[in-house]
């Protein structure tokens, strides 16, 4: 396993529709392991394969179960994910992206989504997600379709600069924004 560099927003790969996963062999298993390791290394809540430079429809998401144990929540690995149903009102909330470091934006997202796709072995799966998990799925599925959250904000004023963690004083150290 290896931590791979995160591709930044100006890279063309983040603007392409990724290719569907067709083979579930060792190459894919290594890619997924690297994605999980990279997500953990950068304290992300989710990661899409194009963010490490691989144009494949693979996403990983892991939300913390509680604040003290960041990597405690259920790990979702979904290949060829698709939103098949959205329910309820949209909600505007703050969102950050590992490929757009130093910024957050207020983005409208559906509060409940149902996602279908394949697990890491090619078995069909379906996930009903709410709240932050629903937001994370929508953000990562956008990535495999070549869309960034900065394309979805209603106006440029909804994107704000945040102080990078390394420049924060001790009082601000808890302000690290969860990114996807
Ligand atoms: Zn992102």
Image: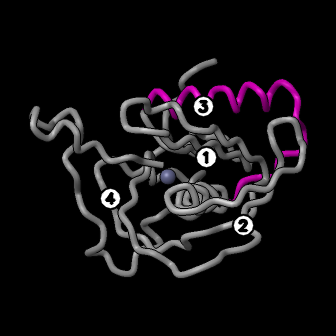
Could you tell me which residue is drawn at 61 percent across and 69 percent down? 112
Q: Check disc 1 and report the residue beneath it.
A: 48
Segment colored magenta = 17-42
Could you tell me which residue is drawn at 57 percent across and 54 percent down? 14
Q: Position of residue 137 (x, y in %)?
A: 61, 57
Q: Earlier in the sequence, mark 4 or mark 1?
A: 1
Give the structural element (helix, strand or loop) at label 4.
Answer: strand
Q: Does mark 3's beta carbon lie closer than 8 Å to ligand 1?
A: no
Dominant SS type (magenta): helix
Separation of marks 2 and 3 at Cα, in angstroms:
22 Å
Q: Residues within 10 Å of mark 2 (few under 14, many from 20)?
A: some
Is 129 in front, or is 100? 129
Separation of marks 1 and 3 at Cα, in angstroms:
10 Å
Q: Check disc 3 and report the residue beneath it.
A: 36
Q: Earlier in the sequence, mark 1 or mark 3?
A: 3
Separation of marks 3 and 4 at Cα, in angstroms:
23 Å
Location of residue 145 by image quarter: bottom right
Q: Residues within 10 Å of mark 1 (few under 14, many from 20)?
A: many
Image quarter hosting the N terminus: top right
Is 156 in front, or is 141? 141
Query: Does the stretch in magenta take in 40?
Result: yes
Q: Earlier in the sequence, mark 2 or mark 4?
A: 2
Give the structural element (helix, strand or loop) at label 1.
Answer: strand
Separation of marks 4 and 1 at Cα, in angstroms:
18 Å
Q: Pointers 2 and 1 in contact (CB under 8 A)?
A: no
């Amino acid at each position: 396993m290896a931590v791979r560099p995160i591709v930044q927003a100006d890279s063309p790969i983040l603007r392409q529709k990724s290719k569907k996963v067709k083979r579930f062999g060792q190459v894919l298993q290594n890619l997924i392991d690297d994605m999980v390791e990279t997500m953990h290394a950068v304290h992300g809540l989710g990661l899409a394969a194009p963010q490490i430079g691989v144009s494949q429809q693979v996403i990983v998401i892991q939300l913390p179960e509680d604040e003290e144990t960041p990597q405690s929540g259920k790990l979702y690995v979904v290949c060829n994910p698709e939103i098949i149903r959205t329910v309820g009102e949209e909600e505007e909330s703050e969102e950050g992206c590992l490929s757009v470091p130093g910024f957050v934006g207020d983005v409208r997202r559906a509060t409940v989504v149902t996602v279908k796709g394949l697990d890491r072995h090619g078995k069909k799966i379906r996930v009903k997600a709410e709240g932050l998990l629903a937001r994370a799925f929508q953000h990562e599925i956008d990535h495999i379709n070549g869309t960034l959250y900065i394309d979805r904000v209603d106006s440029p004023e909804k994107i704000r600069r945040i102080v990078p963690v390394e420049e924060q004083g001790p009082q601000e150290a808890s302000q690290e924004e969860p990114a996807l």
